[in-house]
Amino acid sequence: MFKEFKEFAVKGSVIDLAIGVIIGGAFGKIVSSLVNDIIMPIIGGIIGKVDFSNFFISLDRTRYATLQEAKSAGAATINYGVFLNVAIEFLIISFSLFLVIRQINKLRKDKEPELVTSKKCEFCFSEIPIEATRCPHCTSKLEG
């Protein structure tokens, strides 16, 4: 059983998966930083210096200046600004993966063999249908 497990763990696909998970985690951190530190401040600046991470609804009907203040007070909140940040992160990651997979598929795409629908007459060298038994140009009888 240990030998089988060792063979399974050392197979290329398991190692590839592990590397993919590690790179994916790092990529996620980069995208999070991109959204939280670059994109959202720009959007907030355009619409009036708004910090989206502080968009929330306090369920105890008390007004708090920031989300951190509401959490410190132990208030239950609906954090729709944080959700907006995460949704934008998801869209960026999804689009990035789409672009990567699209390029991989272009590289992987095996050229399908072209369907042969014609042949050359061995007597007059005209292009004729593959099923032809006689050449329509020179009327020669064709083999097979």
Image (cartoon, rainbow, N blue to C red):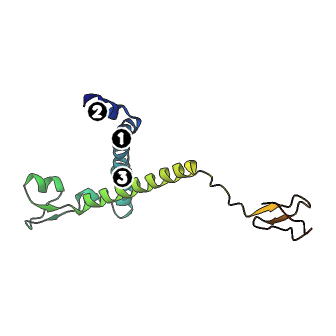
Circle 2 sits in a helix, a strand or a loop, which is it? helix
Name the quadrant containing residue 18: top left
Earlier sequence position, callout 1 versus callout 2: 2
User: Depth check: 12 or 120 in front?
Assistant: 120
Q: Position of residue 88 (x, y in %)?
A: 35, 58
Q: Which numbered mark, 2 or 3, is in the foreground of this view?
A: 2
Q: Position of residue 92 (x, y in %)?
A: 40, 55
User: Depth check: 42 or 123 in front?
Assistant: 123
Q: CA distance from mark 2 to mark 3?
A: 41 Å
Residue at 90% x, 69% y is: 139
User: Are the residues at dot 1 and dot 3 in contact (C-beta closer than 8 Å)?
Assistant: no
Earlier sequence position, callout 1 versus callout 3: 1
Earlier sequence position, callout 2 versus callout 3: 2
| Disc 1 target residue | 26
Residue at 76% x, 64% y is: 130
User: Are the residues at dot 2 and dot 3 in contact (C-beta closer than 8 Å)?
Assistant: no
Residue at 7% x, 54% y is: 73
| Disc 3 target residue | 35
Few, some or many residues within 10 Å of mark 1 (<14, 14–19, 20+): few
Name the quadrant containing residue 113: bottom right
| Disc 2 target residue | 5
In which quadrant is the C terminus drawn? bottom right
Q: Which numbered mark, 1 or 2, is in the foreground of this view?
A: 2
The type of residue carrying mark 3 is: Val
Furthest residue in direction bottom, as rendered: 136
In the picture provided, is 57 more to the left or to the right than 7? left
In the picture provided, is 50 more to the left or to the right than 116? left
Circle 3 sits in a helix, a strand or a loop, which is it? helix
Q: Which numbered mark, 1 or 3, is in the foreground of this view?
A: 1
